Image (tube, grey):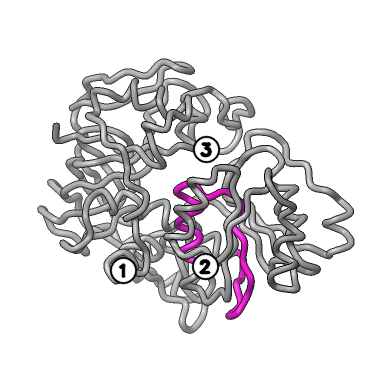
Amino acid sequence: MKKVFIDEPYHVQIKDVITPTPADGELLVKTELSGISAGTEMMLYRGTFPNLRLKKWPPYQNYPICPGYELVGTVTEIGKSSRHGRDNPQIGSIGPGSQVLMTTTDDFEVGDRVVCLGEHGEYAVVPAAFAAKLPDCVPSEEATLAVLATTAMHAVRQAGVCYGDVAAVVGVGVLGLLTVQHLKNSGARSVVALDIADERLDTSVKCGADMVINPMKEDAGKAILSRYGILADVVIEASGFPGTERLATEIARDRGTVVILGWHTDDMAFDFSEFFYKELTIRATRAVGPEAGLPYSYVRYGSDQSLKWAVELFEKGRLSGEHVKPARYSYEDIGLAYKLIDQRDPVAGLQVVLDWQA
């Protein structure tokens, strides 16, 4: 089978490897499309991913690296069922109501169309908890957004949005646009989108943003205060660019919440006076949320349950990838796709997917 490897910064190639066999609790998925991350994946391509420098926190501490994070495909083989403690009496002894909700191989059949976390390759072996079945009404290109949508969903949960809040999203790339939609679903009274690219702000309006601000053209805090009489109750920073964390604290109200969703490769520099005098809550949010299989009385939404819910939101039309319009390339053109994304070429658009059926 063919698989993508980054051997060193700016050097990507396709190699022939043995098609893997799924172990207990795993699925073998034949890839149709795989999505390229303009964030983490580009950091791996450029060599700026912090773990490469720090040799700390898995994964991706050394080259060569097999990149990738979400794909759509078909289940071709299923490993033996591995329930990972769903009926484990030790887990049950934690207390009443501490049962575990977890996606297992029992939930799948050969031939199922799925979205899952996985690397760029003709086939991917993934734990069953990393996959979710897709209904026929959700197109494959849209489905490649489901994993990112799960990450955005977790950020909104971390923000603790209250019904009627004014919420702001700093940076409206694909992740930010999905966050805008989740905030609307969560009951936010109004969603403010901030970006330095006017075309992205225009797209955010199509995704439900009520107000847009280009902070290079106007004072964001004054604009929000003028419209709502209050700064944002919650701010989700979704860009990862230097300085956006400072902007996020500036537009948050007293005792507001700031969630850092974007991955920052440099140390962040908050204005301590903003943090101190406003008594802000600043929270981190990791990709796709807590691991699957934890007792739901302690962790209500594991990553597998959130992925299922993201798919359902696409099915119901409450999330949409209609305005993302991904650029599509054959997997053989991975080098060109990476180059375009790295150079922020408009040809690459907001999202790039690799076609493994070409």
* Region rendered in magenta: 159-182
The structure residue drawn at horizontal position 60% and vertical position 62%, both measured from the top left corner, is: 192
Q: In terms of secondary structure, where does tag 3 sit?
A: loop
Which residue is identified by label 3? 58
Which amino acid does the dot numbered 1 rest on? Answer: Gly
Mark 2 falls on what kind of element? Answer: helix
Mark found first going from the N terminus, 2 or 1: 2
The C terminus, quarter of image? top left
Report how far apart the C-alphas of labels 3 and 2 lie in the structure: 30 Å
Question: Which residue position holds label 1?
Answer: 317
CB under 8 Å between discs 2 and 1: no
* Residue at x 52%, y 30% (from the top left corner): 43
From the viewer's perspective, is the residue at label 3 or at label 2 nearer?
2
Residue 338, picture quadrant: top left
Per the image, label 1 sits on a secondary structure element best described as loop
Relative placement, left or right, of 87 versus 238 is: left
Which residue is drawn at the image coordinates 27% and 52% (left, top)? 115
The spot of residue 319 in percent (x, y) is 37, 64
